[in-house]
Image (cartoon, coloured by chain):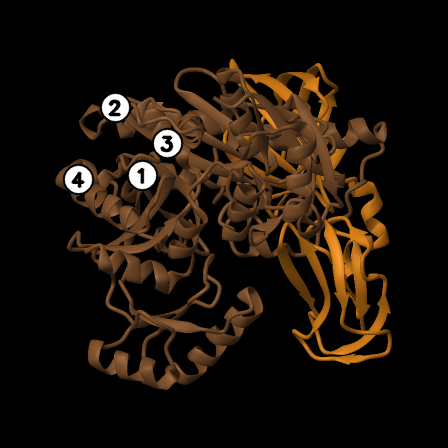
Amino acid sequence: MKLQVAINGIEETIEILAPAPDCRFRLGQDAERGAEVQVPEPGVYSVLMGGRSYDARVEEHPNRLVIALQGYRFEVAVRDPRRLSHGDARRGRQAIESIASPMPGRVVRVLVAPGDAVETGQGLVVVEAMKMQNEMKSPRAGRVLSVAAREGATVTAGEVLATVE
Amino acid sequence: MFRKILIANRGEIAVRIMRSLREMGIRSVAVFSDVDRSSLHVRMADEAEHVGPSPSAESYLRIDRILDAARKHGAEAIHPGYGFLSENAEFAAACEDAGIVFIGPSAQSIRAMGSKTAARRTAIAAGAPVVPGTDQAATLEDVRGFARSHGFPVLLKAVAGGGGKGMRRVDTESELESAYRNASSEAERAFRDPAIYVEKLVENPRHIEIQVIGDRHGNMVHLGERECSIQRRHQKVMEECPSPLVVLHPEMRQAMGEAAIRAAAAAGYYNAGTVEFLVDRERRFYFLEMNTRLQVEHPVTELVTGLDVVKMQIEIAAGARLHLRQEQIEWRGAAIECRIYAEDPYNDFLPFPGKITRLERPLGPGVRIDGCMYAGWTVPMEYDPLLAKLAVWAVRREEATDRMIRALGEYDVGGIRTNIGFFRQILEDTGFRAGQLHTGFIEEFFRRHRPPLPGRDLAEVAALAAALHTLGRNGGGGDSHAAPGPDPWLAAGRSGLLR
């Protein structure tokens, strides 16, 4: 099984040659490695490799995994290269921009309606959590296509609040 | 002594107070809002009373409902913790009128120290040094005149202020008028009081505060200082005792301690309080303000003095005399505290409430946690993001610093985002280790800091864990994670910063 991974923005391939617990794998051009892997709790990977013990904690974020390991933080995006030919990966760059909530919270104000013309940096929606208000701004000049946010509604991190074209 | 005390607070401080009550054999009454029904302070309490909907204005800030709860449960005293009603003179007076003891100073003392300008006048009258400034609300013309005679830069502050709201640094006369107008309208919005006064700006000061505690019979002592210079957006994030500066210049503790006691005594103060000072590069100190309540960072004082400040507060409120004279108070070793917040250090420190799925706490030598987390608890979005305070003690500051790094490494909170990873590189920084602290430290640290790079073996393990996690979740299918767009954090090249 070969997967494409982006580790802190750097593209690599990882090939899983034998599954856990007695795992064999190869990262990029590195030599093949053996690692004994246990999952003591969901999201926690205890790895013994080359006589060393590693305790990796995996957190799921929108579009990526965040791995905490020995005090370092790795952002890793994983995808299957067999599916890349459809060009899905580039879809995010098209003319419609989605404005997502960067944090879980409550929508306290909706400042625009579909059809409104907006400037770059203009406030669209205000989300509040833990006594802090955060105004989501338009990343571009254009027209508001849709507004999913409703005043008083709770939102999760990554939830789309509005789209601008 | 009291038999039952109501705690008019929530979160980690309610839990902290309950621990002392339990050791003293006093029953605790928790209050809670809708969203806090399953919070730890309710589960730990002996008795509990619902006081309203989730917004604090309809629950924890409702004086009538808190007093009703106290009467219903037969509580003889109320501990207000910090925040909420703790510095509300009207609440202290209402407790007194209801025949319930307020565990804190009198309403008059709270008023005397409540407004920044009133506190300045009290301090000046007591002979405590203050930063040159106006002692009353100032008009734009007053401010201009002050700046011309004392020189720029100056600092505009809200009379009713706190938390950095209504505060503006002004470096030149041309900025003055708009800065004054902005500060005033911000103060109006935050405190419903547009009044502004002006002080000479102290460049890169240290923030050092003195813990005082006095009884109702005229005795007062200080429990030494806490250095709280490590701040972000005017909010403290790390505190320590002793101050590394005071360790080098021990005479400062006595001088600041005496000034703090004089200022507090001038306000007729009793119970625990904290006098905050700014310290300039020439080690001159200036009265900043007094917090008329238990302070968030009191554990570092407790670790170094061996005292329980909450117990002392309760004994004093019950009418006891201080059992310690100043010369009996000793400071041993060094303590450091990190404030653990539900916020995302990779996304501009935005709050990040949610459900805690996994929790592992540091243990072992010299570690103390004051917190309110448990696995399965949903951190509410309605309140302050402070989840826990991790404090460590060791004989020397250097060892305490290493111990804190070790303890942070053991701390794992899954499901939400926290600032736990944020502290490590500050603790490893040579400037921090040399004790060269000032309130602009974090800002300056981010400007000069270059994060170390992880070894290749760590990248391999991270990639392996990510691959196995993805395959395990999708039964071997892969690709649940779409290719990421350009990540602003990665673009900023800060990938290793918060290791």
Residue B45 horizontal/vertical position (percent): 64, 24
Nearer-N-terminus badge (1/3): 1
- The residue to which callout 2 is attached is B332
The correct choice, above or below, for A137 with respect to B428 in the image is below
Question: Mark 1 and 4 residues: CB-CB less than 8 Å, in contact?
Answer: no
Identify which residue is drawn at 28% across, 37% down.
Answer: B218
Residue B274: which quarter of the image? Answer: top left
Q: Amino acid under label 1? A: Val
Badge number at residue B300 = 3
Question: Cα distance, mark 2 to mark 4?
Answer: 16 Å
Nearer-N-terminus badge (1/4): 1
Badge number at residue B254 = 4
* Residue B460 in sight: no
Nearer-N-terminus badge (3/4): 4
Q: Amino acid under label 4? A: Gln
Q: Nearer the viewer, residue B283 or A62?
A: B283
**Label 2, residues with CA under 10 Å away: few <14, some 14-19, many ≥20:** some
Question: Cα distance, mark 1 to mark 4?
Answer: 12 Å
Q: Do circles 3 and 4 both sit on a common chain?
A: yes
Which chain is tinted brown? B
Q: Do circles 1 and 2 both sit on a common chain?
A: yes
